[in-house]
Amino acid sequence: MTDERHDTLFDLLTKQAIEGVDQAELVQLKALAGELNYEVDDSFDIAASAVALACIDDIEPMPASLMARLTASADEHFGVTSTEQPVEDLQPTFEFEPKRSFLGWLGWAVAAAACVALAVNIWFTRSQPQGPTVAGGPTPTASPAKPDLKAQFDEMMASPNMIKAKWSPAGAKDVSGEVVWSDAKQTGFMRFRGLPVNDKTKEQYQLWIFENAKLEEYPKDGGVFDITAEGDVIIPIDAKLATKDPKVFAITVEKPGGVVVSDRKKIAVLAKAETITS
């Protein structure tokens, strides 16, 4: 049981030094340290710093003045003086030897092992022969870039079995554009031309998806969005719930963040779904 508690304490000290611990883990760490009579010091933090420093390729030499000050401080800390001392005074004793816990020294051992492993890995990686660059040799392949919104919108509009609709002005005048939706993928896009720019600190547009042509009382929330520029704008649909065979799409003007149920007093545009394309 004691070995398990030592292991747990070691894991918590390591995590605290590398990524930090939450409040519950901190309480557990302090409790284990008290049970095992271990004084928590900064050895693990220093060990983690040593590993991080080992990753630096080019390290500038330390200024001579700083090195001199550090050397003097080290001498003072460890009780080394320039005067000659009797041999018997230098014999280590439990009273004068610096006290280090097993876990403290283990932290330094872990850092040393990590530094060695890191150095070997860097050397091995850099020493590997590079692939030929002449004609006929392997060429690096780049991950395909994610299509922009217009490309995704155009692709869905050209695909079969998509639900499409065209915007008709309601509260907002001179607005046009289209909606495309895929029941299979549960995703879609809206394109607007002429929808006014909104002040997102005061109001936002919100999409509502109706599965009933008679406009049910509680339609599906399609997400809130902003229009930040005039002209042709494409917005992804962010449906909060699964939607099947939508009949009507409506855009309302709501408070920032949107609402759960709209009073439908400010309807900007509407779009009635067309027959599914084949």
Image (cartoon, helix red, strand yellow):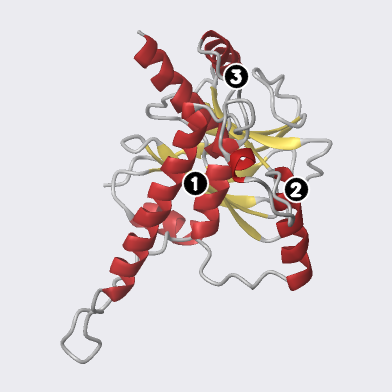
Q: Nearer the viewer, mark 3 or mark 1?
A: 3
Q: Secondary structure at mark 1?
A: strand
In the figure, is residue 95 to the left or right of 197?
Answer: left
Residue at left 42%, top 14%? 5
Q: Which residue is mark 3?
A: 26
Name the foreground residue: 148 vs 13. Answer: 13
* Comes first in the chain, label 3 or label 2: 3
Q: Secondary structure at mark 3?
A: helix
Q: Residue furthest left?
A: 136
The amino acid type found where label 2 is placed reads: Glu
Q: CA distance from mark 3 to mark 1?
A: 47 Å
The reply to whether dot 3 and dot 2 touch (C-beta < 8 Å) is: no
Q: Which residue is mark 1?
A: 189
Q: Position of residue 53 (x, y in %)?
A: 55, 57
Q: CA distance from mark 1 to mark 2?
A: 71 Å
* Comes first in the chain, label 1 or label 2: 2
Q: CA distance from mark 3 to mark 2?
A: 34 Å
Q: Secondary structure at mark 2?
A: helix
Tell me: residue 97, above or below residue 23. below
Residue at left 55%, top 13%? 37
Q: Position of residue 205 (x, y in %)?
A: 69, 37
Q: Nearer the viewer, mark 1 or mark 2?
A: 2
The amino acid type found where label 3 is placed reads: Leu
Quarter of the figure with the N terminus: top left
Name the foreground residue: 278 vs 35. Answer: 35
Q: Which residue is mark 2?
A: 76
